Image (spheres, helix red, strand yellow):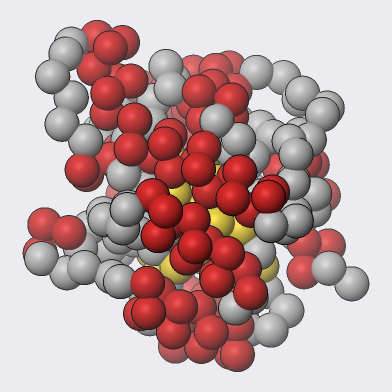
Amino acid sequence: MSRFDRLPAALRSALVQRRLLKVIAGLTNFDAASVERISRAAGLGGADVIDIACDPQLVELAAAVSGLPICVSAVDPELFPAAVAAGAAMVEIGNYDAFYPLGRIFDAAEVLAITRRTRQLLPAVVLSVTVPHVLPLDQQEQLALDLVAAGADLIQTEGGTSARPLSAGSLGLIEKAAPTLAAAHSISRALAAGGLEVPVLCASGLSAVTVPMAIAAGASGVGVGSAVNRLSDAVAMVAVVRGLREALGCPQGVPAPGTHV
């Protein structure tokens, strides 16, 4: 049985139809009130999964208020089993945006080591791994291939923290998303060229303007954090999630090349 078979049917369908919407509360966000607000907005707005910090109590809270499958994010593999036991449907290594301002950089060797240890601890759980955007694109492609060989089920891109948008409005939003869009394009094609049927999630720096571009670039879904979690008004948060859901459109029905779960 595929590890994907353990995911809820609606989540699997969203991946196959290339319309998955993941709302990200934040890998370092352990504020229960914040996670509750974001999770509720994700559920009301029509997201497919909520990505939260790796904490068993937060897993139970987010599941209760959102009604959605829970993904937990961390960079310490030893934290994952307790969160899975609490009900997390999948685990995510990264993304690493919160660490870059602290000068903490994850190289390919470290990400591979974390992946191997996570797979050792959780052989049957769906595992998504973020490829660090600080690597050149050709090295991101190679790392993605190596991560799949090490047991990753999904590959996630990032890049919002490296973007330096110069323009206002839609052009600025596109400039902000350019690094993660480029990574999604390169990695999805490298995986397909290698004969690997692995979904790519495009995350970091995305907005309603750019999530359709992520799908066009080869992603099977998107992860959006700051566009939602930086807001304090509950109504506005739900509106943004609904806008993202609408931007992704209806189920497309035709999987991308190399995408099968």
Looking at the rendering, which quadrant does residue 73 occupy? bottom left
Looking at the rendering, which quadrant does residue 95 occupy? bottom left
Position above or below: 110 against 239: below
* Res 5 seen here: yes
Instruction: From the viewer's perspective, tell me whether residue 172 is left or right of residue 178.
Output: left
The x and y percentages for residue 167 are 16, 13
Position above or below: 198 against 124: above
Position above or below: 180 against 82: above
Instruction: From the viewer's perspective, tell me whether residue 10 is left or right of residue 59.
Output: right
Q: Residue furthest right?
A: 1
Residue positioned 59% across, 45% down in the render: 188
Residue positioned 49% across, 55% down in the render: 141
Q: Quadrant of the N terminus?
A: bottom right
Instruction: From the viewer's perspective, tell me whether residue 245 is left or right of residue 223.
Output: right
Residue positioned 64% across, 53% down in the render: 191
The x and y percentages for residue 15 are 71, 43
Residue positioned 82% across, 29% down in the render: 254
Total numbered badges shown on the rendered structure:
0
Instruction: From the viewer's perspective, tell me whether residue 240 is left or right of residue 102.
Output: right
* Res 36 seen here: no
The x and y percentages for residue 145 are 58, 64
The x and y percentages for residue 60 are 53, 65
Q: Nearer the viewer, residue 97 or 113?
A: 113
Looking at the rendering, which quadrant does residue 71 occupy? bottom right
